[in-house]
Structure formats: structure tokens, C-alpha cells
Image: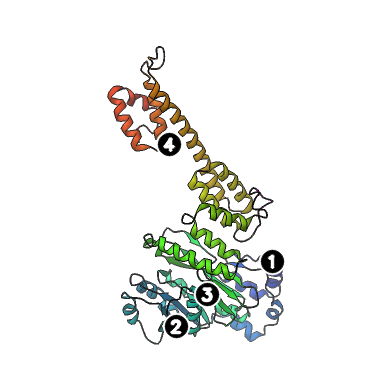
Amino acid sequence: MENLTLLNQRNYNKFLLESTQLKIWFEQISLIKEINCSSINKTNKIAKLNKKQMKVLLNDELTTLTAIIIVKNEEDNIVKCIESIKNYVEELVIIDTGSTDNTLNLIATYQGDKVKVFTKQWEDNFSQIRNYAKSKATGKWAFYIDADETVMPTHKFTLFKKPLRKFELLDLNETIAICPVIIDHNNHKSVGVRRCFYNSENFHYFGHVHEELRKLNGLLNQVTLDINIRHEGYKNEVLKNKEKVKRNISLLKKTIKKEPSEIRWKYFYCRDGAGYLPDEEIETMVKDCILYNPRNAITKRNIMANQYSFHFMVILAEIMLRNGDCLNLMKLSKQMFHLNEDKSNYLYYSTMSLVMQRRNDLMVKLETLSSYREKDKLIHYGMLHSSGYHIDIAILILLIECGFYDKAQKFRNALEEEFPPISSILEKYRFADD
């Protein structure tokens, strides 16, 4: 077992002590990366498993799995998606929401006993479509994969159903959701997206967009498995991104209206709206969501620790970075340091705030020197150069340091005509030939 983490360690220890055989089994399951839950409530039942149940539990008996794909105009992606998963599931349910390209024709080449295609009118509600798709699945487990995703490597997916059957026998199947590792086109990895769950009426999706898988009447725990899903969609979505953001903001407003106290929807509203909505609107909502007193400063005592607090702070940090607010960015990065054990965001934002502060100082100096040189009519006897070319060299260096490379090159070319030794003077600077 690579990494098994239960938030309630006391219950976990009790669970392992009650069955040596189960402890061995868990240690042998290499797919389980993390179990993220508050407790396992049925340890007594585990202790009472009879020999037949235990024998089945320790065998490699599999369960049945339905893969679900929701599509609309995915002719560039759908074949790769289907090919990556079709041989590893008992059923493939595809829901088309109004394709007008060649998507359906490509899917038709796969139709048979395993592949089932349904059409459903799109009504600006992702949960509605997902719940409809779930109603068409007949496998014991449902696994959602987007049309612009592929399972990789496919050979590992053959192991995917083994722990699912174990969870059934442990009577944990209706208490957990399975999260694969999703890898974007830029190799950014994310976990915590609930893609696989037991096909039960106790599970349903809620939310017009960024829909959430929920369980009726009880806690839903997340299990991260070492199954990789490659997502290529954002390569082709840059041009469509503005319309996508506009759509998401509209749908999130509807969901917030339904659940005004649910912080999840406000987080996605701020995340998707950053750079699109006014910064002031985003900042106000973020502070309302993470601070006990939104009028006070962002301090350790004023921050409400919830699952989105750190991510809200990242949204604020990006706004500060974009606006050059280096002082507040440094303060915010220190609060990130206190809130999350992973210090990488703190290191990044604290570094960027120092770079911005230094550049701001250099910009002030550049303005001062440029203004001085424009008015300078003196002959500087006894100075580095009587015509003041040493001031011009300082201006050139500041242009480079501030990132004005085109201006720096033009300024250097003009200066060299009047002051040829400039090249030898600049040799001592490592950026002389930039």
C-alpha cells in the first residue's frame, strides 16, 4: 500500500487490529493512495465475516462497471476516449446532448451489446444530465469520464475493479466515492474529483455546473486510487474560454440562489470569475467566505479554516499579483504558510512579491534618472564622464532590469553611436548581451 491516510486514526487502528487478514489485504492493494474520511462505522461487521466471506474477500473476484460519457460535438476526442476504456468495462453509456458534427457517426461504429447511446436535450444543468446518465447504467458501479479524457495507462485499469469488489464485501460501497488522478495537458495533477461510485439511488449529483456528487442521509468519504485520467480539453478551449466563463457564472448564480449558504458554489464563482468579473466583487465575496470579520485584515485569528479557505486565498493572491499589490501579497503569502503544510504556494507568492517590490523600486529610480537626464545641460567635469554617459548606462541597465528589452536595445544602439566604449563597460554585467 503506497499511502493510506484515515483522518480518524483511532478507528483505523481498531479496524486493522480486528482482522489480521484484512490488514494484509490492505497492505497488498497498491492502487489505494489515500482514504480520506472521518470514520469507518462498521468494524463489528468486519470482525464477524465468516470463512466463506473472508475467502471471497481475499480473492480477486471482480464487480461490474459502467463507464459514462456525456458528449456534444466531440468528433476530435471521442474515438480516443472510447478506445481507452471500452475493453475494461462491462457497459459504456454515452449521452449526447445535441451534437451537430460527426460525433454520433463515429460513436455508431462502436454500438453493440456493450455500447449504449441515448440523447437528452441540454437544459443548462450538468447535474440533470449526469443523473439521467446514471439512470441508464446497469453496472454495479458507475464511472464518469469526459469525452476529452483518456484512461492511462490502460493496463492498470484492469486492476481498478478489484478494490471495488472488496468495498462491496466490506459493506463500504455506499459510503465512498472513488477519485482518480486527473492529469491536464500541462501535466498538472489533481485529485478529489469524484468520478466513480456505487450505482445506488443513494447517490445523486447537485448543482448546475461544477456539480457535486452527494449521498442521501450520510457522510460520503473519498478514496483516491492510482488510476490516471489524461485530460486534453484545455488545449482547444482557449478561444472558447470567455464564453465558457460567462456560461459558468450564469449557472453558478442559479446554484447559489438555491444554496446561498453553501461555500462550494461561491468558491467556483470566484475562481471562474477571476479576471472576468470586477476584482472588487471577487475580493468582497472571498473575504465574506473566509474571514470571521470581513472588514478586518487577513490574519491567522480572522481566517475561518474550511476546505476552500486556502483556495480562496490563492484567488486573492492572483488578483494582487495581477495588480502589482506586492505588500499585501507578501502578507497573504505568510497566512498561506500557516494554513497549509505544503509551502510551495507560499514560496511562489512571497518570491513574486519580492520581485514586484524590487521592480517597483527600480521603476522609481528609472523615472528619476530619466527625468534628470532630460533636464541635464551640464558638463560634468571630474565625474565618470563629462557628458553624463555614465547616467545613460545606468538608465540602460534599469531598462533591462525592469523588463523593457525592446526599449533597452534601441537605447543601447543610439548610445553606442555617441559613446562606443559602452560595450566594454557593459561586459562586467552578465546580461550585457541580452
Q: What secondary structure is found at the residue carrying circle 2?
A: strand
Q: Which mark is residue 230?
A: none
- Residue 357 vertical placement versus 128 (above, below): above
**Disc 3 marks which amino acid?**
Cys
**Disc 4 marks which amino acid?**
Cys
Say left or right for 26 vs 238: right
The tag earlier along the polypeptide, 3 or 4, is 3
The tag earlier along the polypeptide, 1 or 4, is 1
The tag earlier along the polypeptide, 1 or 2, is 1
Occupied quadrant, residue 104: bottom left
Residue 297 visible, this orientation: yes
The quadrant the N terminus occupies is: bottom right
Towards the viewer: 352 or 329? 329
- Name the residue beneath numbered marker 3: 196
**Disc 2 marks which amino acid?**
Glu
Q: Which mark is residue 8?
A: 1
- x and y percent of residue 419 in the render? 31, 22
- Name the residue beneath numbered marker 2: 91
Which is closer to the viewer, label 2 or label 4?
A: 4
Q: Main secondary structure of the magenta part?
A: loop
Magenta segment: 292-305
